[in-house]
Amino acid sequence: MKFVFSAWSEKKKQELYEQYKDNFRSQANGNEPEPFSSCHIWKGSSQNGYPSISQGHGKSKIKMHILSAERKYGRVPRSNECVSHLCHRKSCIQPDHLIIEPITTNNARKGCHCAIVVQGLLVGLCWHEPRCLRADTSLIGVGFKPSVTNLTNILQDQ
């Protein structure tokens, strides 16, 4: 996959990043089972839900989450890789929530429940490395709360 900014100089990429990097609203994550740093939710335009910047009529759009990851890791994803959102929010550009990883690993993250609290104890459900930061609600709905009745019964029976 070729990215618009791949051939740009480091200076030009940094200038673009600096120009747009503050175009977000902070979204606190203190209500998660394991609180983590705030998401940086992109306020600008998007393409398929991913933050993007138009480079003019007929030109490709620059994906801000990919540019943000490139600034952190010093490279763009290879053809078999993508930028994954550990927070499962497509519109997040927080560099600490992004990782470059194989497409297969990214696909395996879909539907990850991350962690739940059972009788006051945190039960980690995520087996990914690095771990997901929150449950993936894109496939299960925003208000999803896993039923722990059966899990509680199983734990009590042992």
Image (cartoon, rainbow, N blue to C red):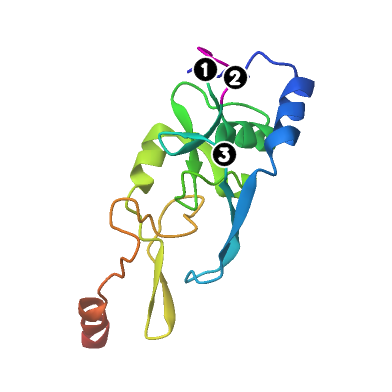
Q: Is residue 107 left or right of residue 61?
A: left
Whether pointer 1 and pointer 3 mark residues with C-beta atoms closer than 8 Å, the reply is no
Q: Which residue is mark 2?
A: 55
Query: Upstream in the sequence, badge 1 or badge 3?
Result: 3
Query: Upstream in the sequence, badge 2 or badge 3?
Result: 3
Whether pointer 2 and pointer 1 mark residues with C-beta atoms closer than 8 Å, the reply is yes
Q: Residue at x 57, y 44 (%)?
A: 43
Q: Amino acid at mark 1?
A: Ser
Q: Residues within 10 Å of mark 2 (few under 14, many from 20)?
A: few
Which quadrant is home to the C terminus?
bottom left
Q: Residues within 10 Å of mark 3 (few under 14, many from 20)?
A: few
Q: Which residue is mark 1?
A: 60
Whether pointer 2 and pointer 3 mark residues with C-beta atoms closer than 8 Å, the reply is no
Asked if 88 appears above or below 80 in the picture, the reply is below
Query: Upstream in the sequence, badge 2 or badge 1?
Result: 2
Q: Position of residue 92 (x, y in %)?
A: 54, 47
Q: Amino acid at mark 3?
A: Gly
Spatial CA span between label 2 and label 3: 13 Å
Q: Find numbered disc 1 in the image and state the secondary structure of the residue it sits on.
A: loop
Q: Is residue 32 magenta?
A: no
Q: Which mark is residue 44?
A: 3
